[in-house]
Amino acid sequence: MSYQSDLFQDVATVAEAAIIEPMTEKYEGATIKYEYPLHERVRTYLRLEHLKQLLKPEQTVDATNYSRYFDALFAILELCERSDVRTDVQKDLDRRRAQIQIWAQHPDVNQEQVQALATRVQDAIKSIQPLTRIGSHLKQDRLLSVTRQRFGMPGGTCNFDVPQLHFWLHQSQAKRDEDCQRWWHEFSVLFNGLELELELLRGQAHFQRVVAEGGLLQESTEPLSLLRIRVPADVPAYPVISGHKQRFSIRFLSSVPQQGKASFENDVEFELALCP
C-alpha cells in the first residue's frame, strides 16, 4: 500500500512533492485526529505548536485567563531554553529549499506553485537567520522573571505573592496588549518558520484507510518523521502509539475497560498518513 501523495502521477521519483499542493482532506464522518512524532526534533515542534494554541497570542489577556497565558508562555520559553529550536527549524527549511530546487527542474511540475512555495521558504529562512538565543530578552523582563518563579507553586500567583502581577492585571487593556505583543514578538519569527515546516511535513503524505486487526497494527517502513491518524469518533477506543523512525506499533485501548481488560480487541478501520 502506498501512503505517498500522487500529485505527480507517473513520476515516482518525485512523489514526495505533494507538499507543493495543499492537501484536500475528505471526511465521511466525524473523526478524532492524533499525531505521533518519530523524531525528537518533530516532538519539540509539536509541543511548541500545542503551546501556541494554548497561549492564543491573538487574544487579550486579563484576570480571567492570565493563568493559561503565562503557563503556556513559560513552557514555550523553557522548551526554547532546553533545545536550539531556531537552528533545527532553519536546517529543516534549508532542506526544503533544496528539494524545491529539484522539483522546479521537472517538466510536469506546476511552476507557479513551486515558485510560491520557494518564496515562502526563502522568506522564512531570511527571517530566522538573524535571530540569537530565543527568549533571552524575556529572561530580563522583571515582571516575567518574578512571575515565573512563583508560577510553579500551588496558588503561587496570589496577589500577596506576586504584587507586580496583580498590579499589571489592573492596568489598562491597551497596556497589557502592548506588553503581550512585545513578549510574543520574541517568538513570532520562530513560530512562522516552525509552522511552515510542519505544514510541509504534514503535506508529504495523504491519508489511506487501514485496519488494525484485533485493535493492533504494526509496520516496518522507510524512515519517517511523523504519523498522522484519523479515527472515527464513534469508535470507543483510542490509539496508543510507540516506535521509532523505521518501525511503529498502534494499539487501540478501550475508553471503558471491560472486566479489567484495557485492550480493544475488535478490528478498527481508520486513516493513516506516514510523513517522511
Image: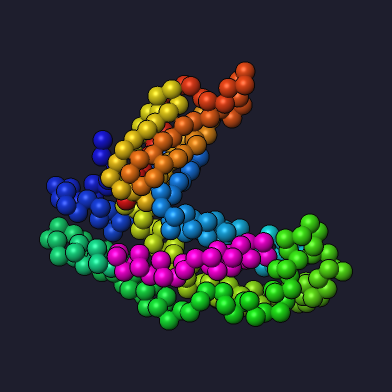
Q: Could you tell me which residue is drawn at 36 percent across and 55 percent down?
A: 201
Total count of labels: 0
Residue 52 within the segment the image draws in magenta: no
Q: Could you tell me which residue is drawn at 33 percent across and 73 percent down?
A: 122
Q: Magenta residues: mostly which secondary structure?
A: helix
Residue 118 x %, y %? 29, 69
Q: Is residue 136 visible?
A: yes
Q: Quadrant of residue 126?
A: bottom left
Task: Identify the image's colour scheme: rainbow, by chain, secondary structure or one colour.
Answer: rainbow
Residue extending farthest left: 107
Q: Quadrant of residue 182?
A: bottom right
Residue 265 x %, y %? 48, 22
Viewer-closest of 83 and 14: 83
Horizontal relation, residue 68 to residue 106: left or right: right
- What segment is highlighted magenta in the picture? 70-96
Residue 151 x %, y %? 73, 63
Q: Is residue 205 visible?
A: no
